[in-house]
Image (spheres, rainbow, N blue to C red):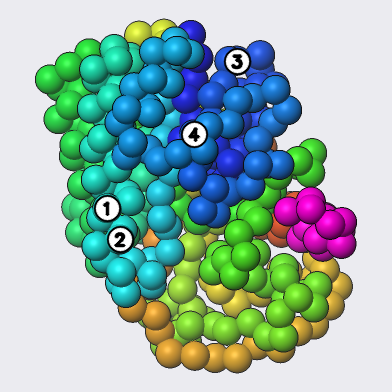
Amino acid sequence: MATLVTGGAGYIGSQMAHDLADAGERVIVLDNLSTGHRWAVPDGVPLIVGETGDQALVTRLIREHGVGAIIHFAASIVVPDSVRDPLGYYRNNTVNSRALIECAVEGHVRHFIFSSTAAVYGNPAAIPVPEDAPTQPISPYGWSKLMTEIMLRDASRAHDLAHVILRYFNVAGADPRGRTGQSTPNATHLIKVAAETALGLRGKLDVFGTDYPTPDGTCIRDYLHVGDLTQAHSQALRYLRSGGGSLTLNCGYGHGSSVLEVIDTVKRVANVDFKIDYAPRREGDPARIVAGSERIRTLLGWQPRFDDLAVIVGHALDWERKLVSRRKSPGSI
């Protein structure tokens, strides 16, 4: 049986595709290449360019490739953009996911892993936030993901479709082997932006909000290495294949770093200073969000390998340097 990876030419999805291919799995990638790259897909893995909402296409892929599991990454992910374009986010994240889930049910796919987000919690009252905390999103992005969670749970109860929902916290870093990483132009991820600034690719870094109720006034996030995140997906797939029931799990380390702490780490690891400007808060940003991660460690046996902010930053910097080299080679990106 094959595993269909949606968004598999993007940042996290391509890392997942590499991990599965490394393990000898049959992998099929579906990506519309709006933010992904052909070169990010592992050699020998079929890339189908298309939309997850194209039910005729997805149905054909499931049938022709014998898809037994779907790992669903494809989504729009920028919180401020979702505030400006809520309908676009509901279409791409929610409507297309509904179509994909229906194809999975009709194609007798048994296992489904969904990349959700800590944004479903909004501004949580308890830190670290447990999986049973109230889900109160404060952005259309968070709502679009929560709606998909609800649809997936309902479909699983009505049909033979076991699932694992992984609520990501802040994904960062890059493949330790240097094969893939965050490559989207004008990305908004803090560690990527800081790494670009350290390498002189940006003139300055904007810090959005210094008046949050945190020790240094800036937002605190649980920064998670992309390799540890995809390892969690691999363990979730093994869990489902062994007959495990549906689960919703946080995926984070259980401790956080502030924006200013991240910036200081990037400066130290890169051994360079750079300009910082302070700007007002962005709409939709919670002050502090850190994962309660006991369940994923217990139920999936997840043991992170890269739980060190300096390591995450080092891999991100290495990837940015590689991107600079790629851009100097015509046709490479």
First in residue order: circle 3 vs circle 4? 3
- In the displayed structure image, the side of residue 39 where residue 240 appears, left or right: left
Whether residue 32 is in magenta: the answer is no
222 or 324: nearer the eye? 324
Number of residue marks: 4
Give the residues drawn in magenta, as a range: 320-333
**Residue 232: % across, % down:** 51, 32
Near mark 3 (Cα within 10 A), the count class, few <14, some 14-19 or many ≥20, is some
**Residue that mark 3 sits on:** 25
In the image, residue 211 sits, relative to residue 65, either above or below, namely: below
Quadrant of residue 269 within the rendered picture: bottom right
CA gap between label 4 and label 1 equals 17 Å
CA gap between label 4 and label 2 equals 20 Å
The amino acid type, in three-letter code, at marker 1 is Arg
The amino acid type, in three-letter code, at marker 2 is Gly
Q: Residue at x 60, y 59 (%)?
A: 184
Asked if the residues shown at circle 3 and circle 4 are in contact, with their CB atoms under 8 angstroms apart, the answer is: no
| Marking on residue 91 | 1
First in residue order: circle 4 vs circle 1? 4
| Marking on residue 68 | none
CA gap between label 1 and label 2 equals 5 Å
User: Which one is in front in this view, the residue at disc 3 or the one at disc 4?
Assistant: 4
Query: What SS does tag 4 mark?
Result: strand
**Residue that mark 2 sits on:** 88
In the image, residue 164 sits, relative to residue 60, either above or below, namely: below
User: Which one is in front in this view, the residue at disc 3 or the one at disc 2?
Assistant: 2
